[in-house]
């Protein structure tokens, strides 16, 4: 089952990167890399405590929020909101391929995918 989930997330990641490419925005390649890893800023909350860390991390890695932002971009015809939504989806899927999931309140290693090693 874990392999199936990772393959599904890999497909979502690849699809998201493809749709980012289709946006055809005039942004340099290094900016895309910087933006791709920007949701990890949500880990800063763990400097306060596990509860706050989990909340902030999960906001930056929740696919529902990413979809809402992307859909808002489509409705408003705002390519940058679409980009933000796609980056959040791509990043979250990439994390899940690596075994990082949404966090529980009692520690960074406890995710909705199981306990990380």
Image (tube, helix red, strand yellow):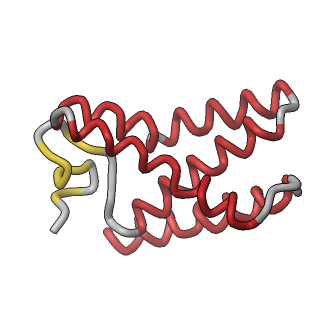
Q: Where's residue 69, x and y in %? A: 65, 32
Q: Is residue 61 above or below residue 48?
A: below
Q: Is residue 21 above or below residue 44?
A: below
- From the viewer's perspective, is 6 left or right of 64? left
Q: Quadrant of the N terminus?
A: bottom left
Q: Quadrant of the C terminus?
A: bottom left
Q: Where's residue 98, x and y in %? A: 37, 69
- From the viewer's perspective, is 69 left or right of 42? right
- Residue pictured at 69% horizontal, 37% vertical: 70
Q: Residue furthest left?
A: 106
Q: How many marks?
A: 0
- Residue pictured at 48% horizontal, 47% vertical: 39
Corner quadrant of residue 18: bottom right
- Residue pictured at 50% horizontal, 65% vertical: 8
78 or 33, which lies in front?
33
- Residue pictured at 56% horizontal, 47% vertical: 88
Q: Where's residue 103, x and y in %? A: 26, 44
Q: Is residue 8 above or below residue 83?
A: below
- From the viewer's perspective, is 79 left or right of 70? right
Q: Where's residue 33, x and y in %? A: 62, 63
């Amino acid at each position: 089952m874990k392999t199936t989930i990772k393959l599904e997330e890999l497909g979502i990641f690849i699809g998201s990167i493809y749709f980012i490419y289709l946006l055809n925005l005039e942004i340099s390649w290094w900016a895309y890399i910087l933006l791709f890893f920007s949701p990890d800023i949500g880990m800063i909350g763990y400097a306060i405590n596990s509860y706050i860390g989990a909340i902030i991390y999960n906001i930056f890695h929740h696919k529902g929020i990413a979809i809402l932002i992307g859909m808002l971009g489509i409705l408003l015809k705002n390519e940058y909101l679409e980009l933000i939504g796609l980056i959040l989806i791509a990043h979250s899927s990439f994390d899940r391929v690596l075994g990082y999931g949404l966090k529980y309140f009692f520690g960074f290693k406890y995710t909705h995918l199981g306990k990380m090693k």
